[in-house]
Image (cartoon, rainbow, N blue to C red):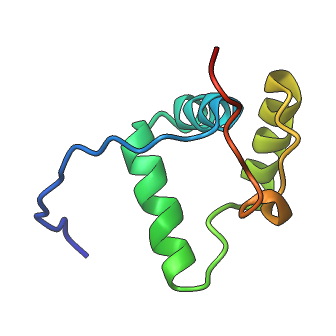
Amino acid sequence: MGTMKIERVQTGIRLEKRLVKVLKGLAEAKDIGLGDLVEGIVLHAFEGRAPFSAETLDVIARLKAIYGLDLTAADAHRLEEEAGP
């Protein structure tokens, strides 16, 4: 299977701070860009497939502990940003 030509666009999405730290750490551990990591996660999710191996889930668990990320999928639709000063 060869490579596919695609067009990428810049996006300005906002994500929870600790989640971004874990994603960046995982991208670094996998030696890929953050955008490539997110694309892979989304493409797997769109097909109902798990994006991570057991080994990668261990890396994620360590990164979550380092960055204090205690959010779970159950929290996904309950997050509210704190009011600014």
Residue, x 47% and y 49% (percent of image)?
A: 37
Instruction: Please tell me which residue is depicted at 84% across the width and 65% down the height of the picture.
Output: 74
Q: Position of residue 17 (x, y in %)?
A: 64, 29
Residue at point 76%, 42% (across, down): 60
Q: Quadrant of residue 21?
A: top right
Between 11 and 50, the residue placed more toward the observer is 11
Q: Quadrant of the C terminus?
A: top right
- Tell me: 27 left or right of 13: right
Quarter assignment of residue 45: bottom right
Q: Is residue 65 left or right of residue 27?
A: right
In which quadrant of the rendered image does the N terminus lie? bottom left
Front residue of 69/27: it is 69
- Give above or below for 42 relative to 85: below
Q: Residue 75 occupies which quadrant of the picture?
A: bottom right
Viewer-nearest residue: 37 or 76: 76
On the image, the x and y values in percent for residue 51 come to 61, 66
Q: Position of residue 23 (x, y in %)?
A: 60, 38
Residue at 78% over, 31% down? 63
Direction from residue 2 to residue 28 in the image, left or right: right
Q: How many marks?
A: 0
23 is higher (above) or lower (below) than 48: above
Position of 79 with respect to 6 (left or right) is: right
Query: Which residue is situated farthest in the bottom direction here?
Result: 47
Vertical side of 14 occupied by 78: above or below: below
Residue 71 placed where, x, y %?
Answer: 83, 47
